[in-house]
Image (tube, coloured by chain):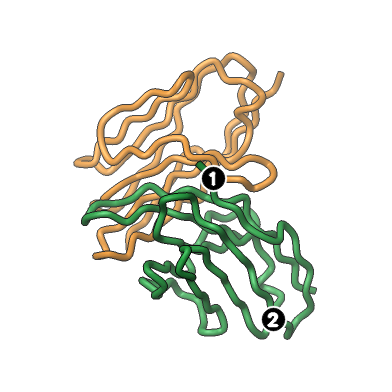
Chain colours: A orange, B green
Amino acid sequence: GIQVEQSPPDLILQEGANSTLRCNFSDSVNNLQWFHQNPWGQLINLFYIPSGTKQNGRLSATTVATERYSLLYISSSQTTDSGVYFCAVDTDAGNNRKLIWGLGTSLAVNP
Amino acid sequence: ETGVTQSPTHLIKTRGQQVTLRCSSQSGHNTVSWYQQALGQGPQFIFQYYREEENGRGNFPPRFSGLQFPNYSSELNVNALELDDSALYLCASSLRSGGMGNEQFFGPGTRLTVL
């Protein structure tokens, strides 16, 4: 089955720093989503991005489907950005739209 | 627009017991997926329901079962609980349309502890 790899696994930043998180996937996908999981476990949708580039405030994402990777950019990081960032891909499995997840990048932003 | 809700938020059970977790999908959505997330791992797909029928299943034994109701809400049932079933159980709703991928939105999860 499809493999999803995220890097780096852990990241520590000082408030105000920028960062880039990467997601590689091993096969073609219908869609890709980025999530932020807060310390209480809630998954927050960041981007639904099968291809191209999107921006939302300090966050932006780019997916290059032909090269099977996606990047999440966080600029001017804040302590509230801390948590785990997941990339999940939607496989081309007919009508079964299940998400296959990476292991996440654990981000800690220090004041 | 009402988001995805789950109940209960926390639950403690003992080995061998049975548990039912509930999920109300987001308004306008017709598909519910269930995921299990162990500590330090990404979520793992359990199964998906569309129009009250199971529409795909991950590598979980038959003691994991589910239902979807006419209002698109859903239940996850786990029989004969094992210690390894301790995890965060996440419900996601989406609107299935056409042949393309559909964005999934998650509830806050139910944290199950099996003693």
Q: CA distance from mark 1 to mark 2?
A: 29 Å
Q: Position of residue B53 (x, y in %)?
A: 39, 75
Q: Position of residue B28 (x, y in %)?
A: 41, 51
Chain of the residue where label 2 is placed in the rendered structure = B
Residue at x-position 29% and y-position 53%: A26
Q: Secondary structure at mark 2?
A: loop
Residue at x-position 40% and y-position 60%: B31
Question: Residue B18: which disc?
Answer: 2
Q: Are marks 1 and 2 on the same chain?
A: yes
* Camera-side mark, 1 or 2: 1
Which is more toward the observer, A51 or B77?
B77
Question: Could you tell me the amino acid type at mark 2?
Answer: Gln
Residue on which disc 1 sits: B2
Q: Residue extending furthest front?
A: B70
Q: Where the C terminus of chain B falls, by quadrant?
A: bottom right
Vertical position of residue B53 compared to residue A70: above or below: below
Q: Position of residue B70 (x, y in %)?
A: 45, 69
Residue at x-position 30% and y-position 27%: A53
| Tags 1 and 2 touching, CB below 8 Å | no
Mark 1 / mark 2, whichever is N-terminal: 1
Q: Secondary structure at mark 1?
A: loop
Q: Position of residue A68 (x, y in %)?
A: 27, 43
Which is more toward the observer, B53 or B13?
B53
| Image side of residue A89 versus residue B13, left or right | left
For disc 2, the neighbor class at 10 Å (few under 14, some 14 to 19, many from 20) is some
Vertical position of residue B101 compared to residue A74: above or below: below
Question: Could you tell me the amino acid type at mark 1?
Answer: Thr
